[in-house]
Amino acid sequence: MNKPLTITDISKILLENSFVGVHLVDSEGIIQYISPQIENMLGYKATEMIGKKAWKFVYKEDKKYLIKTNEMLTNHLGLQKETELEIRLVDKNGKIKFFYNKVYNFLDDKIGFIVTYFQEITEKKEEEEYFEQTQQYLQAVLNHTQYGFFLLTTSRKILYYNATAYEIISKAEENLRIGDDLLDYVNSKNKAHFLDVFDKCLKGESISYERKIILSDNTEKWLDFRVAPIYLKKNEIYGISITLTDITARKTAEMYLLKSEKTLQAVFNNSAQISFLIDKDYKIIALNRYAIKSTEAKLGRKAQIGDDIFDFIDESEKEEVKKRILYCLEGHYLRIERTIKLQNNETQWLEIYYAPIENENKEYFAVNIAMFNISERKNAEEKLKYSEKLYQTIAENFPKSNVNVFDKNFKLIFTQGELYKYMDLVREDFLDKTIYEIFSERTNLILESNMKDALKGISKSFEHRNKLGFFLVNTLPLIQETDKEIENVLVIFQDVSDVKAKEKNLEQLNYDLDNQNQQLKNKEEQLLASNEELTVSNEHLILQQDVLEEINDKLTQQRSILENVNTELELKNETLLYRENELKEAYEKILQQQEEVQFSLIEQQKLNQQLLMKNQELATQEEELRTTNDQLRIQQDEMRITLAQLSDRNFELDQLVYRTSHDIRSPLTSVLGLVNLMRLEGLPDNLAEYVDRMEKSVQKLDRFVSSMLNFAKVNRTERKNEVIDFEEIILKCYDDFRYMPHFEKVNKKYFIKNEKKILFYGDILRLEIIFANIISNAIKYQNRLNAPNNFFNFVKIKIIFYFFDIQ
């Protein structure tokens, strides 16, 4: 039968089988124990290290730091239980090695030592130093290269630039700084193109292009830009790199080469239009033979390559032409029409096209000005406008008419149609026929004479009547140009049947009016005779009227006296009535005021009664409030006593839970250690299942006790806001749950996104409990049935900081 293992034996087995080195140090810093891993790491045997000061094996520059850490732990027993640090140790061969240490203070516990875990990180540190040296070498190379180099963030901020880039940019703009937006140093004309290129690079494209920049001394420089994304990880763009190369010399040579190409000149010379090729300095770099002829016809001298285009343009038009050329150099096309006056005072219409010319780099370096002589087309357009205007005038002045045009040989060359309706002809096509073939002989006698007068510039008209009605035939000269002979006659047949009918009606009305006037004259004579008789009888009546007027005067005098008396009586009567009305109104007002006073007295009495009742009710309520307040004060005193008692009970319960949980965890940990040792020793098949169940039950109880401890800690400690390191909390949780089943088969990932470096404040203890519950549940309840053989589910933690700017 095997001898049972002690706690010391179990601890030794665990330490010796750990993947990290462990040593125990007392309060004086003397090594009491080292694990075999440290022997392998440093090459010393245990006997060479035990009993010596721990800092004897530490690199000289780290000794003070280690001694200070040891004093901090030993002088604050019970306050600081653990710490982490990185130190350098010297192995037996004198080689310096880097270690990550996690130190636990168990001086006040049963262990009685400071326990330190060692994890070698020499390889990691060497990689970091190599990366730093490589970065320094790279920076030195970039600063001495002929190429300018920029490294930008995804938001265009400058992360790095070399000396060559500074020399290029600083001449165009001063005060180049890390952190600036590179867009601020780009010329306003090139900003849109720069933003387009930058957006394409953010999508993964690499772009190269050439651009001309203007320096502060107004000199020009051509640069070759190579813009490419930088990947920190696969498919994750970290930033944008821009490489600049000065290509001014090459571009100058290319531009002069393009100017001297003979092919372009040949194309110009064989073109039908007038063509000029103008560069950005408004110099003629190419022109064809028609352009030479046009300048000679206009100014009397021939244009040549190298001449300024403005030497051949009127002073009043130079500014407008300059604007058009600049507009085309931005990639736009223009078309205009205008007239010019030649040296012989002849006016010529030109159609002018402005077109930008690109080079092989898709840059606009010149403008092609092409001119076409459109004088004939414009003259035709003017004639068409004149004809349209003439037709409109005829339509307005000759309604219900038919318009026809005859040449000087009296041949019909244009007709509006339906000529047969106006001249009572058989319907047929009359075009290209003379008047002798169209009209009757009697009509032609008058029409021929009038048309001859029209060819002399004299307008005439005559009336023509047929069974269809009356028609007015107008002959007018058709003048197209004032200084030329009249060749066409305008003949307008106007239907005036309605006018003639109205004239006939008017004549009948005039005849009827004359008859009525004669009848009126007869009646007037009869009235004059009767009027004389009336005059005689009127004289007799006048005499009688004089007598009656004398009698009437007397009656009028008497009537006026009576009217005066009557007026005085009416005035007195109106005065009495007015006073009577005033007295009635005053009496009614007095009665109304008496009623209002009586009503207000009654209302006042009612209000007084209501106020008395309300005062009584308020007095009763005030007494009740006093009684209620006294009762509330008594209840508050009782509640304060009860709360104080509850606070004491809660504190006692917290202490009981904390102590009980702490005491229970120690044997539980021992039981779990014994279970692991039993497995190492080997178990019969019939006991393995019971041991597994026992282990699960103990782990479940341990988790319950841990949660009780955490709950007690949360209740005992006050909420305190501190800066939170989420990475430290997550790693600590991983370390605490290493003992859990299948922990090593869980893929653990965490992602913390904090681009703006925001500090997060909170209660560390409560956050540790929250993360511990999340991670332990994820490990405990993982789905192992559907997972691959060598790998279970994973724990993925994602923390994103959101910044809210509250204003």
Image (cartoon, rainbow, N blue to C red):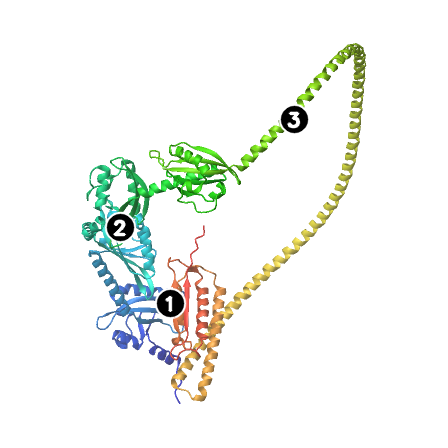
Nearer the observer, disc 1 or disc 3? Answer: 3
Q: CA distance from mark 1 to mark 3?
A: 141 Å
Q: Earlier in the sequence, mark 2 or mark 1?
A: 1
Point 36% across, 40% down: residue: 382
Mark 1, Cα crowd under 10 Å, few <14 / some 14-19 / many 20+, is some
Which of the 4 image quarters holds residue 735?
bottom left
Say which amino acid is labelled 1: Glu
Disc 3 and disc 2 in contact, CB within 8 angstroms: no
Mark 1 = which residue?
82
Q: Earlier in the sequence, mark 3 or mark 2?
A: 2
Q: CA distance from mark 3 to mark 2?
A: 93 Å
Instruction: Looking at the picture, tell me which residue is in the foreground, 337 or 676.
Output: 337
Say which amino acid is labelled 2: Ile
User: Which mark is on residue 357?
Assistant: 2
Say which amino acid is labelled 3: Gln
User: Which mark is on residue 315?
Assistant: none
Percent across and percent down for residue 445 are 43, 35
Nearer the observer, disc 3 or disc 2? Answer: 3
Q: Earlier in the sequence, mark 1 or mark 3?
A: 1
Percent across and percent down for residue 207 are 28, 59
Q: Which image quadrant: the N terminus?
A: bottom left
Disc 1 and disc 3 in contact, CB within 8 angstroms: no
Q: Is residue 106 left or right of residue 623?
A: left
